[in-house]
Image (tube, helix red, strand yellow):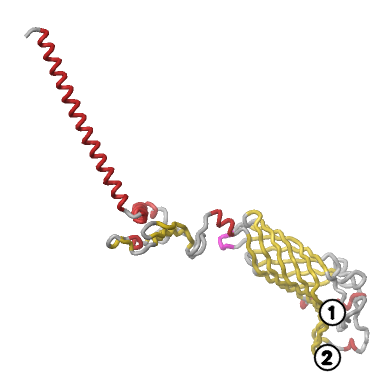
Amino acid sequence: MNYNDMKKSVLVLGLVAGVFTTSVNAQSRTVKAANAINHTKDAIASVINLDPIDVVAEYVHKKKNAVADLYTANDLKFDASLTSVDSGKRKTDTTEIKVGKTRIVVIGEPKIEKIYMEMDSTGDFDSDSKSYSSDDKKEHKKSEGNLEFSIGYNGFLENGSTSLSAGNKGLNLINGKSTNVNLTYNHYFNIYKENVRISVGLGLDWNNYRLAGDSTLLPTQITLTFNTDPAANTVDFTKNKLLARYVTMPVMLHFQTNEGDNGKRVGISGGVELGYLINGRVKQVSEVKGKTKVNDKFNLNDLRYGLMGRVSYGDMGIYAKYYPQSTFNKNEGPDLNTFCVGLTLGLD
């Protein structure tokens, strides 16, 4: 065999070896691709055959141990029976997962219809039948109202003093029995979260002035007048009071802290109160005359405005009110101012 024939043989063998190697590699890649496709088909089939709620349940089961490391056994509750399979069907169409104060509810049979969060007895979310997003919750608490009851003492001030001049001695009061009672519905509007709020209310206010003397206020007089008949003034009254009743509209600005561990807040409030006189009344009780009532305005001011302030803790507060204008009409009675101090119940 000469050199040229040998060269041709080597080239032919090399070509055959290359074709064989290429064929083997191609077959190997084809097998790998087929295996990958089969694995993918199996994975897809396993997912397709699972109901969506079962996928959720399986995921939760896988993650349950990891979550348990973050919460105590009492905080993490998962009822596996809710998602168990019996003859290809779930026992119920609802799955509940509770972590801390949050309960996740998944509803659906056979497909998921709704997923939402709700509160338990100590949680932060809304009722059993409703769910809110964070924006809904914020809007839900943007305003609210409540009924407040106040009771305290009221009195007269003359030039800033509780001691009245001799000309007004008929209006000297028994301070411990002169009471102020108020019932008001206030509606609150949040300005900044629940820390800064404004309230507008509508209420009824009673000023009971318990007179210390036995003189009798007379109705339908041009000026405030007491009975000056010595014989009439000898009657010993066990009760002798002037009552003034008003419809009121308070407007107040409130500042309060965030809730403490006990759920209570410390607050301070201030504002004004507008009032309109509904009626006046003198009520007297004695052994001689029994019980008598006389309705009249007794020269009381029809309109009044007052300054008011309050310090509160939780649902209780201490209030104070002062009315700068005279309690009685100008030139129809003494120039006396009314003040009130007492306790308020029913605050937010």
Q: Residue at x 73, y 60 (%)?
A: 270
Q: Nearer the viewer, residue 179 or 36?
A: 36
Note whether 152 is above or below 97 in the view shown.
below
Contact (Cβ within 8 Å) of mark 2 with mark 1: no
Task: Estimate the x, y position of residue 280 in percent, counting from the top left.
Answer: 82, 77
The answer to which quarter of the image holds residue 291 is bottom right
Task: Estimate the x, y position of residue 60 in percent, counting from the top left.
Answer: 37, 54
Q: Which residues are magenta?
A: 259-263
Which numbered mark, 2 or 1, is in the foreground of this view? 1
For disc 2, the marked residue is 289
Q: Is the N terminus in the top left, top right, bottom left or bottom right quadrant?
A: top left
Main secondary structure along the magenta-highlighted residues: loop
Q: Magenta includes 272?
A: no
Q: Give the spatial CA distance, label 2 vs label 1.
A: 19 Å
Left/right of residue 4 with respect to residue 128 in the rendered view: left
Q: Earlier in the sequence, mark 2 or mark 1?
A: 2
Q: Magenta includes 260?
A: yes
Q: Nearer the viewer, residue 108 or 275?
A: 108
Q: Secondary structure at mark 1?
A: loop
Q: Nearer the viewer, residue 30 or 226?
A: 30
Q: Residues within 10 Å of mark 2 (few under 14, many from 20)?
A: few
Q: Is residue 174 visible?
A: no
The answer to which quarter of the image holds residue 269 is bottom right
Q: Residue at x 73, y 74 (%)?
A: 181
Q: Is the C terminus in the top left, top right, bottom left or bottom right quadrant?
A: bottom right
For disc 1, the marked residue is 296
Looking at the picture, which amino acid does disc 2 mark? Lys
Left/right of residue 230 with respect to residue 16 in the rendered view: right
Looking at the picture, which amino acid does disc 1 mark? Asp
Task: Estimate the x, y position of residue 317 in percent, counting from the top left.
Answer: 68, 66
Note whether 210 is above or below 103 in the view shown.
below
Q: Residue at x 56, y 63 (%)?
A: 262
